[in-house]
Image: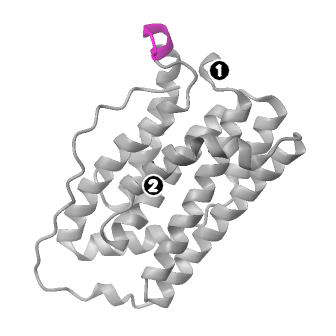
Amino acid sequence: MVNWFWKRRRPARILRLRSRGERGDATRVDFEELAPDVEVFLGQAAYLQLGYFETLTRLIRRTPDLVEKEALSLAAGAALRKHRGIVEIIRDRGEDPTELMRPFQASLDQFRRKTIGARPRETMLTVHITAGMLDDFYLALASSYGETGRRVARVLRAGHERQQIADILRTTIEDDDEMRGLLSMWARRLVGDTLLVARAALRPTRLDLEDEQKVEPVYTALVSAHSQRMDALGLAA
């Protein structure tokens, strides 16, 4: 059994989250006539996976421990495979993946910058939570696009290889009270930012009461799955 180096108790210290300013509440989300055009769906989904690959590869460079590097590399490889799978679908439709992704580059890069933590554990948690929620969201959207959506769903359902990252986080949470509190606060921030990304993917700029009722089941499912991920880590959602 691997003897993780962070299992040793560390001296007491004060951990604080960086201030990130005020943000509005997330709007409840989800669909079919609310779903964006298929080109929008494909471009966003492809660029999100590319972004996760970039975040994970940067984190590999910041991580000295070989066990952690291996865990991160597995997740990075899975994100890249998903990106390439969606790119292949785009090309099969006779479209240019770069042109479909370009309109979302600035906003999704901003999302990644806002959700990269000051510490590697925060960024690991970012990927675990936000990728999980957004994979679920795009899987729900995929049902709106016929065979193209079914192909994307098969790509997104492929193994994400984030379990080792979850194991590292869970061990840290179990053995470090201060990090547990910090990561719990960080996770709450991530949910709001992630739901805003999901909301921005929908067609209308505002949802009326009828639309809210249509999207409520998927929103509820996203939060339920998130709660399960948090419980598995030993954190309260």
Residue 97 drawn above or below residue 217:
below
Q: Is mark 2 on a helix, strand or loop?
A: helix
User: In the image, is 93 to the left or to the right of 81?
Assistant: right
Depth check: give the residue in front, 186 or 110. 110
* Colouring used for the render: one colour
Between the C-alphas of marks 2 and 1, the distance is 27 Å
145 relative to 176 in the view: left or right: right
Front label number (2 vs 1): 2
Q: Which amino acid does label 2 sit on?
A: Arg
- As displayed, is residue 121 above or below residue 24? below
Percent position (x, y) of residue 114?
37, 53
Verify whether residue 22 appears in magenta. no
Check whether the beta carbons of the residues at disc 2 and disc 1 lie within 8 A of each other.
no
Q: Which amino acid does label 1 sit on?
A: Glu
Query: Which region is colored magenta?
Result: 206-212
Q: Quadrant of the rendered structure where residue 173 is?
A: bottom left
Instruction: Give the total of numbered labels.
Output: 2
The residue that mark 2 highlights is 112
Res 5 → quadrant: bottom left
Q: Which mark is residue 32?
A: 1
User: Can the viewer see residue 17 in this picture?
Assistant: yes
Position of residue 192 measured from the top left corner of the image (x, y, whole percent): 35, 40
Image disc number at residue 5: none
Can residue 237 be seen at all in this image of the molecule?
A: no
Q: Which of marks 2 and 1 is nearer the N terminus?
A: 1
**Residue at 63% across / 50% down in the picture?**
47
Instruction: Residue at 71% x, 41% y: name it.
Output: 100
Using a 10 Å C-alpha cutoff, classify the residue at mark 2 as few (fewer than 14 neighbours), some (14 to 19) or many (20 or more). many
Q: For the point 39% across and 65% down, which residue is it?
A: 123
